[in-house]
Image (tube, rainbow, N blue to C red):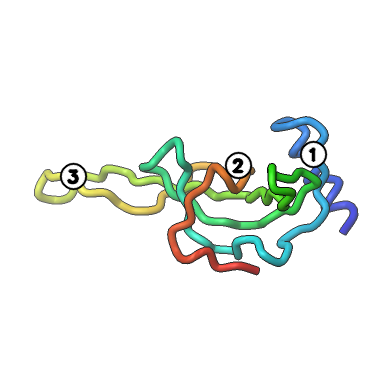
Amino acid sequence: MSDAQKILEDLFQGAASSIKVTEINPPGSMVYGTLVKHMDDPKTFGFVSEAYRTDKKDLDGADIFYYNIVWEGLRATKNDQGSYYHSPLMQKYTSVEPEHELISWHGNLLN
């Protein structure tokens, strides 16, 4: 477990300095598969693949969770009649995002 936490801490170092992962998939975090979208890009959806508790706290002293998100998108595809339709959920990329930048789309299912 400590090797995985060390790898995760190394990943976080590029995004923010001095973040320490204290727990993976902690109680109270969103579960694997929860559908989310990013507040800055309303056309891009993703799903939670892993949750992390860090040593960071919000103004009220509550934990701030970070999530590893597999981002998906809508791709315009031409059908036989020549019109376009959107084929859902083409994988694009992954990123680690803080919970305050995400909008959950199916009920905040928690670990």
The vertical placement of 26 against 98, above or below, is: below
Q: Which amino acid type is shown beneath numbered disc 3?
A: Tyr
Pair 2/1: label in front: 1
Of labels 1 and 3, the one closer to you: 1
Residue that mark 3 sits on: 84
Q: In the image, is 36 to the left or to the right of 1?
A: left
Residue pictured at 78% horizontal, 33% vertical: 13
- Please tell me the numbered disc located at residue 19: 1
SS label for mark 3? strand
Which label's residue is closer to the chain start, 2 or 1?
A: 1
Within 10 Å of disc 1 (Cα), the crowding (few <14, some 14-19, many 20+) is some
Task: Point out residue 6 in the picture as x, y percentages from the top left corner.
Answer: 86, 46
CA–CA distance in space, label 2 to label 1: 16 Å
Query: Which residue does the numbered mark 2 point to in the structure image?
Result: 95
Assign a secondary structure to mark 2.
strand
As helix, strand or loop, the secondary structure at mark 1 comes to loop
> x, y percentage for residue 33?
54, 63
Foreground: 48 or 93?
Answer: 48
Residue 97, numbered circle: none
Query: Is disc 2 surrounded by few (<14), some (14 to 19) or many (20+) residues within 10 Å?
Result: few
Observer-nearest of 12 and 106: 106
Q: Are marks 2 and 3 in contact (CB under 8 Å)?
A: no
Can you say which quadrant of the picture contains the C terminus? Answer: bottom right
Left or right, 40 with reference to 76: right
Three-letter code, disc 2: Ser
Marks 2 and 3, the one that precedes in the sequence? 3
Question: Residue 36 at x, y = what percent?
Answer: 48, 53
- Cα distance, mark 1 to mark 3? 44 Å
